[in-house]
Structure formats: C-alpha cells, structure tokens
Image: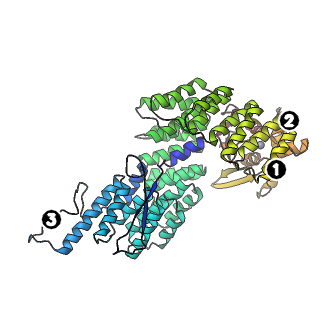
Amino acid sequence: MLATACRILATHQRTRPTPLRILPTAEEDASATVCIRSGTGASDGAAPAQEDVRRARSIETPSPCLTADAHVSPWSPPPSDSTGTTTTTRRRRWRLVSYNAAISRCSRAGLYRRALALFHEMRGHGLRADEYTLPPLLNSAALLRSPPAARALHALLLRAGLASHLHVANALVDAYAKLARPAAARAVLDEMPRRDVVTWTSLLTGLARAGDHGAAVRVYHEMAADGVDPDEFAVAAVLSSCAGSTMLDLGRSVHAAAARRGFEPFLSVGNSLVSMYAKTGALRDARTVFDAMPARCTITWTAMIVGHAQNGRGRQSLDIYTDMVRSGCRPDYVTFIGLLFACSHAGLVDAGRAHFRSMVNDYGIAPGPDHYACMVDLLGRAGRLEEAMDMLNRSSTELDATVWKALLGACRVHRNVELAERLAEMVWRLDPTDAVPYVMLSNLYSRARRWGDVARIRALMKSRGISKEPGCSWVGVNGVTHLFHVEDHGHPRAAEIFRKVEEMTERIRAEGYVPDTDWALQDEAPEGREKALAYHSERLAVAFGLLAVPVAAPIRVFKNLRVCGDCHAAIKMVAKVYGREIILRDANCFHHMKDGACSCGDYW
Ligand SMILES: [Zn+2]
Ligand SMILES: [Zn+2]
C-alpha cells in the first residue's frame, strides 16, 4: 500500500475519459481524423497536474502578436493600419492569431476539449495551423489522454512541414512522453535536427513517470553528452528515477550538481530531493533538505511522512504531521496513507483510528482501498481481526485485492488458517493469477506443520501455471549495482562471498542464532533447508556488503520481495556481531538494523 502512496506521489490521478470525435475539414487531408476524449469534472478534461501546467508553459511559445491579457475575438475586425484599410490577407492573419490565442488560453486553463474544438472550428474557416497553433493542441491531446488525437496532430504537422520546428517538435515529444509512449517520443527526438533542454527533459520526465528509471538515467547522461545543461525539471525527474531505482550515489551527485546550478530553492527540486533521500533510506539527508527549503507544500510534507513511516519511524511521522497541520498545510489522500501506514507500523491503534476518522470528518476525504488496507494492517497486527472484518463489512468503498491481502498478512502473523483460507478465495475471485495468497497459505500451513496442505497448494499453483516472483537482492557499491539470486554463483567474487556467508553463519550461531527452517522450502530435508536459508539472496548481498562497503558506511541492501523471517533474524545478528549498520529495504518497508535490533520492531 505504501508503494501506491509513492506511485501517487510521483504521478497524479486522472478522471476516466469518454470518447468524442472531431472531423477534419475538406481542405485538410480527410484522413486526419482527430479523435479526442473528453473528461468529466470541473474542468474540461482530466484535471491538469500542477507540474503539467508548469511544463506546458515552458513548452508552449505564445504567439508573438499576443499579450497575456489579449482578449481577441476571431470575428472582431483587425486593427486598422495607418491608411485605415484592411486586406483579405491581413484579415486571415488576424483570425489565425486570434484563434491561436484562444486555443493557447484554453489549453493553459485546462479546457483541453474546448481547445481542440476551437481548432476544428478554425479549420472549418479554411485556416491552417502554424507553429503557434500546434503546441497547445498537442498538450491538450496529451492531457486528455488521447493517443489518437496526438497521432493525428503528428500527421498534420508532418504535412504542414513543421516537424523540424523546435517548439513544435518539442511539444510532440512531450505529448508522446505524457501519453506513456516513450518509444514514439524517442523516435521524434532522434529525428530532430536540433534539441534543447526542453526536448531532453520531456523524454526524461516521461520515462521517469513510466517507471523506466534505468532508461531515464541514461537519457540524463545522454543529455549531458549532447552538451545540454539540465534545468530544474530535468533534475526533479532524474531524482525521482534515482529514488525509484534506489541509486543513492547518483542521487547525491545530481543533488551536488543541482546545488551548483542554484536549483535547490525550486519547490519541485526540493520535493524530489526529500523524496529521493527518504526512499533510499537516507533520512538524515531528507531532513537536512527539508529544513533548508524556503517553501513547502503538501507533497513535501507527505514525502517526509511517508519516508519516516517507511523507515520504521512511525512516531516521527506523526510528529511531522502535527507540524504540517500547524503550518497551515492541508493533508491530502496520500498524506493519510502515509500516516495510517505509520500508525500501523508503530502499533498505534488509537491514533490510527483517530486519524482515519479525522480524514473523513475534518478533511472530507473518502477512504480508498489503500486507507482500508492500512487500517486492516493496523488492527490485524494488534490481533483485532474481528474488528478489521467488521470495518470492511460496513465500508461502502469498493474494496480491492490489496485490502484482502493485508488481512491475509494479519492471518499469517496470528496463524489464523481458517480465515486465511476464506480470504485467499476472495483474492482469487478478483485475480486468480495473484501468487501472494498461495505463498501466504503455504507459509501458514508449513508453520502449522500441515505438510499435506503445503503440497496441495504447491500443486495447485503448478496446475494453474502460477509462479512466485523470484526473489533477488542488490547492493550498490561505487555506482555499480551487484545483484544476487538465491544460491547465486554468478558473481565474479562468488567464492569469496560464499566463504563470507559461512563465516557469518558460524559467528551468529556462536551468538545464539538458531535457523527457523519453517521459512525454507518444504520439499528439502532438514539439513538442506538450513543450507538453503543461509544462501538466500539477501544474505549473499549482505556478505558482499561486508566485503565491499567501507567499514564506516552503512550497508544498503534492497530486496524485491519481503525479507523472510529467518533472514531478518540472521541479518540483525550479523549487524551486531560485525558492528555494522545494515539498512535493508524490502518490498514493504525499510529495516534499519543495528546492535541486534531492527527499526521495524520485528513486525513487518
Ligand atoms: Zn531468507
Ligand atoms: Zn525489520
């Protein structure tokens, strides 16, 4: 559920569109059918994200004949020249300029459908689009989430010979990037005779939003190689990719470059820095940036709340929330996901209930599945499974699999097999291919020593063609990511790493560690199970960290799935025995392990 919070923080929710068609005039190519989609809601389309509007302003170039307050009508006569006469050419030019102004104003005001309708009207009067008409139209098509409209405009600009015009091509790259068509955006960029910071940033932002962080980082480097200095938008986008791909070192170097260029005071850069540091487990740095920011918004505060919650600092999340409200900043939907997650991880049942009520009563925010999932987690951890079920039964929100899986997780902790079986059925009804219920049930049965049922679940998974996502862990050292799978001998230093694992096991055993073989696969003999546990990917990554990360620095390990209970116990002991700080981020939260204790309080 916190992954959802992070996703929402990075993107923005949009309303669902309904189709509408605009036909071209006979004068233009009849094949250029512009199909656009209109949104519902207060504005004329999907609500424009603040960032989109700002980006649009940097991309759209206003017509040179216009001023910001120009309220011209296409049907008002053009201003007279010195002789007091008007010619047909001047009249047509005046109408085009007036239409361009109106289209641009509509696009900036979020009236995207109206902008496209005006274009249709304009063509009906025999006027052809120029380099000022197309950028706001492309932006409107993108923000209406209409790839067909963008493609039709693309065809139109090719025919109009405007493809090599920098501002028009930039708007096209941006439209494809916003429409999550990075390949199309890239193709346009590659064809451009000249590219500027706007071109590169559009592609970079699109890739970062689409979650293709590796490609986004590559584009950032390519931009530099092309001799283009990044602007604040590029910096904010690449930082979000550093966070998404856990590249703290690169994030730090982007931060240093941003500081040199004087971008730190920009709100979007500050927000991205706070979020990047928080998501990579560097909370102290997140706090330093936060404290230095000249202005903060809901996104800033929410990034801090979510970051602390994710790093097992639930109580600090609540303190930050108190400061946020005191500062007059209004919490939103995502803020409450972070807050409820914080309460659940810190075991603060009463505070969680109070914030849930306050969200509805004080802020008028209708709880969504993510809020319910947090509440279920909170109540489930406290052993209040009945209360959680009761709350869900009374809810009028359409609940999704996230909620049932959260309750399933609570059943696993409290070993409630009967309820877990019912819940697994509910998740399967929503998504039969979801591996989580199988894994959780198998885990529960194995802890109850019901080996027959374990075998039945494994056979069921096999017959339904469902496979568990393979676990992997990685460590970043000197800008290079080292990835490990279970019992992975593929690393160039594998022999050394395996010796280190053996040494680790010996040393923690001497401190009283006993392997918990219930976490191992059950088709192994007991000795085999112990051995399999010792070579889980997170332990190989920790062993490599001990070998390669300087003693003074914490070892940062990332895992794509949840850490298993046995590795959690073992790595805590490793942190103690070797006197190291180990920060393990799994699919759910961060585990800051030091002196044999973990920030999650052994509850995750
Ligand atoms: Zn493990
Ligand atoms: Zn932990």
* Label at residue 58: none
In this rendering, does residue 537 appear at all? yes
At numbered mark 1, what does the secondary structure look like: helix, strand or loop?
helix
Is residue 281 found left or right of 533 in the rendered image? left
Viewer-nearest residue: 253 or 473: 473
- Please identify the quadrant where the N terminus is shown: top right
Q: How far, Cα to Cα, is label 2 from label 1? A: 31 Å
Mark closer to the observer (2, 1): 2
Task: State whether residue 75 is above or below residue 296.
Answer: below
Kindly identify the amino acid type of the residue bearing the numbered disc 1.
Phe
Q: Residue 118 at x, y = what percent? A: 32, 61
Q: Mark 2 points at which residue?
A: 449
Which residue lies at the image location 55% right of the left edge and 56% below the top edge?
A: 210
Place of residue 10 in the rendered image (x, y in percent of width and height, measured from the top left): 51, 48
Residue kind at label 3, given as amino acid type = Pro
Q: From what the image shows, is residue 350 above or below residue 17?
A: above
Identify the element where label 3 is drawn: loop
Instruction: Give the position of the C terminus as an image quadrant.
Output: top right
Looking at the picture, tell me which residue is in the foreground, 38 or 241.
38
Which residue was labeled with disc 1? 498
- Check disc 2 and give the amino acid type: Arg
Quarter holding ligand 1: top right
Drawn side of residue 100 relative to residue 322, left or right: left
Q: As rendered, which of 336 and 164 lies closer to the eye?
A: 336
Q: Are marks 2 and 3 in contact (CB under 8 Å)?
A: no
Where on the picture, by quarter, is residue 504? top right
Q: Residues within 10 Å of mark 1 (few under 14, many from 20)?
A: many
Ranked by sequence position, the earlier of labels 2 and 1 is 2
